[in-house]
Image (spheres, rainbow, N blue to C red):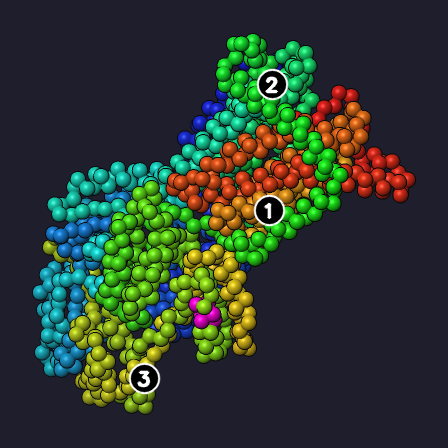
Amino acid sequence: MFISDFAIKRPLLTVVSMLALVVFGLFALFRLKTDEFPDVQPPIVATTIIYPGASPDQVEREILEPIEEAIQGIQGVDFVQGEARDGYASIITWFVFEKDLQTAQQDIRDAISLKRQDLPQEMEEPILKKLSDTDRPVMSITLSSDVLSPPKLTRLAEPGITRELRSLAGVADVAVRGAVKRELTVEMRPQALLANGVSVAQVVQALQSQNLAAPVGRLEGTLQEKTIRLQGRLEEPQEFANLVVTTRNGIPIRLGQLATVRDGTEEPRTLALFNGKEAVGIDIKKTKESSTTDLSRRLNLRLEEVRKRLPAGVKLDVVRDAGVRVDRSVANVQETLLEGAALTVLVVFLFLNSWRSTVITGVALPISVLASFVAVWAFGFTLNTMSLLGLSLAIGILIDDAIVVRENIVRHVEMGKDHYTAAREGTDEIGLAVAATTFSIVAVFIPIAFIKGLSGQWFKPFALTIACSVLVSLFVSFSLDPMLSAYWADPHVPEDRKWFVTRALDRFNAWFNRLAQRYRLVIAWALDHRIYMVLLAVGSFAGALALPKFGLVGVGFVPEDDRSEFNIAIETPPGSNLDYTRLKAEEAARLVRAHPEVRYTYTTIGGASGAVDEATIFVKTTPKHERRLSVIQLAALLREEVKSVGGATVSVFSTDFGGGRKELQIQLSGSDWPELTAFAELVRQEVVATPGAVDVGLSMKGQKPELDVRLNRGLAGSLGVSVGAVAQSLRPAFAGIKTGDWVDPGGETREVRVRLDPEARRRGTDLEQMPLVLAAPGGTPTTVPLGQIATVRQVLGPAIINHLDRDKVIIIQGNTAGRAFGNVSDEITTRVARLPRPPGVTVSMGGQTKDQKEIFTNIFAALGVAVMLMYLILVVQFGSFLDPLAILVSLPLSLIGVMLALMVTGKTINIMSMIGVILLAGIVAKNAILLVDFAKWAREKQGMPLREALIEAGSIRLRPILMTTFALIAGMIPVALGSGEGSQFRSPLGVAVIGGTITSTVLTLIVIPTFYEIMDEWRSWFARKTGMRVAQETGEHRVPPGFQPAAAGD
């Protein structure tokens, strides 16, 4: 083989090439960004539109419906989800994965612009944002104090600290939670307005026109010019009170007569609590290009500097740091990788009984792993759990090629050849077989890398990392291994001078040789009882399928992981204010903090949308090794305890994989709203009755109290009052309006906001007393209360209105606990299907049920393509269309082991255990290749009868088969038993691989010879029937002189 011949003739160049791979690998490693998971950009654009003071009905009719109609016509839209709430609309647009998100965002912006003239003028400009994992804060901090007031804390946080944090490279956004901003508030008194005949609109106009500074031109002299600026800004609060709003009978009516001017704070719509104490929270988000761990490190260094400058009595706490979690998770994977490598090399030494052979074989590991980082860097991946997990899984495979080559070289040495000749001829002889088996493994993972959609992007780093590392190991095995074997051979050591470990291993190998001879009897018995072997194979496959069918193995989706943190969501009844939600959230948080394994809680209410009836409690627990309960167990325990919080709905999320969404989502859509709501209640009851379903609720949240104002159009028209005029008076009065800003003596710029006095905005009668200005025939305006020309009624309206592709939809949501997600989802699907469905109502499963179906379907499709590619590679290797079928029979034999291992350990069939099944597809076939390859060689080269060749193949190949099996199991043990950060996420994969490897190895050793003999008889029968020679029919090649079978691990 050219590569091995060249490497042996140029040893220094070979060494330099390996060193170059190591250097380039280290260079790439230090340039890689570190994140917890792959950098995946979902094809989602979120649009938020603020419409102050509007009810959900109004938001739906005036905002949601026209904008959804515009968006639906954009090319590449997959589906659109809309939501209307008090004062704002939220639209989530999912595009096909191939759609460029920058283009998609611009398309949405253009579509809204075309509709802008049909939308309310009071609507604020839409906010468009591409959703991604970077939307989650990389760090959250809080400022709290027993000395400073909330407004002063807010001023300290913003713009002071936030400006400093924004200046750091890699910071995308800094958001403040629980801020209490100072503002100049003009609180109008309705009775004073009514008594003086002044409207709200007049107050607003006076403030807007009399509190401003504007450039009005310039004076140009002969050699100089001067700018003219009209300085009309008010400088003191008292000046606002003296401002003239209008005149009545020549007498000025001043603002102080109509309203109270307060130098105070805005009405809070957001709140942050750290351990129950009011605080100001700061969420820091990273850019897509930055590294989580690097940014976290730099943020912590900057925060140390900030702490030194804080006033006395102010405390800064880091409540959430993704960098620390990522560091721990990645370090745990690296530790798992090293442990797996050490165990694998130990297995090699156990069987080869030579430290030089172990070094020559084991050197492939570090070189292949380091060189793989070059590929990770070149592909633009990050150093994350999935790419490192790929290397962890490859540990047991990377050394296989080196074992094969080294064993064959040693065999040639034992034939009496010198080391130089043995290295060259031994590698040449085995080269094609080794390459074929390596390409078979690559063929398993390449289709995974090209899965479409989000799941493909998620698995791509994992699949390509394994494929690249295996290809590098093949190159190392063809170059460095033969070169070292040629120039660094094992010296002869007399028996009396052998190390005691060597003598012990000699005895082990002698025992193993006797075991191999006994195994010949097992194969002979199996060949004499072929029907039993067929039944055993079919029965094991059927048993593997039956275990999940009968519920002995659960079906999940994403393994739950213990990150020493979880979230609790609080929903108070529609119409609840901030104080009520705070009361209920803190009641739940106190129950949580009472548990000794909880370190602290961080509660946030409201936000950019101003939804004050929702709160989130972030719970940080003690480290995993200090706890008696896992996070999943602790979350389940606290779920029961917080149920005692009355007047609120509490949901517990033990994992944040869904981004705050509940796992279970049943979507009901239809045009008849009363019929849809009635059916939704029936579905909700079925979900509640399903074992394992918890935190069940409806997306619509019930009815919310509203005040309905209906004008007496005849009377209003006769008085010259229009609906628009009433709206212009009511909106500033109750929703408030910004009329400008004011720079206080300290230089702080604050908003000037006008609204009614809080005491005049508490009761429905206050609304009836709202004064309206009427134009009188004589020219003198008069005022009347709203109640004289309109009827004010309290009604109930929807708190939330959801849309799916422009249709109204109700979503029944829930989480799972104590039972596998897939089993709960399947039972709910069955229960809902039995319900009598009203005409026009459609039912679809969303949430993780939809995600699970998509990902599992893609994995199965990729696995099918991988098996076809493997078959084609084996056809080329064996020169036969039939022989590879005997090898592929080994693939299902691993499933029974996978299922039994998952059942015994209590794991589920999820995306990680599915990855284990994919890995097994590439590994399991190697054992069958070893048997079939040697049997073919023995028949064609030595003229053995088929049965004798199969028995001989089993005896000779038992050692390499068990050697590669033990090496793989050793590499997987740290993955299966890991206890560090992120270990529970990876554990199902290791368990599946170990279980599948054990059963597939045992069954392969007795089943594959049987199936090969059966297929050979079928081939002979076909040849006799058709009168054709077997070689012609099957396309088998004639064995060239000097052909030798594949050796260990092939």
Q: Note whether residue 406 is visible.
A: yes
Residue at the image point whose x is 9% and y is 78% from the top: 251
Give the percent coordinates (x, y) of residue 943.
Answer: 81, 26
C-beta proximity under 8 Å, tags 3 and 2: no
Q: Which residue is mark 2?
A: 482
Circle 1 residue: 896
Sooner in the amino-acid sequence: mark 3 or mark 1: 3
Secondary structure of the residue carrying tag 2 is: helix
Nearer to the camera, 6 or 717: 6
Farthest-out residue, right: 1027
Question: Disc 3 versus disc 2: distance between alpha carbons?
Answer: 92 Å
Task: Give the quarter of the figure containing the C terminus.
Answer: top right
Query: Residues at badges 3 and 1 in contact (C-beta under 8 Å)?
Result: no
Q: Give SS at disc 3.
A: strand
* Mark pair 1, 2: CA separation: 39 Å
What span is in magenta? 683-688
Q: Quadrant of the N terminus?
A: top right
Amino acid at the residue labelled 3 = Arg
At mark 1, the secondary structure is: helix
In the image shown, does 583 or 969 lie closer to the viewer?
A: 969
Residue 960 figure quarter: top right
Q: Residue at x 85, y 41 (%)?
A: 1021
Against 582, is 132 above or below? above
Q: Which residue is mark 3?
A: 710
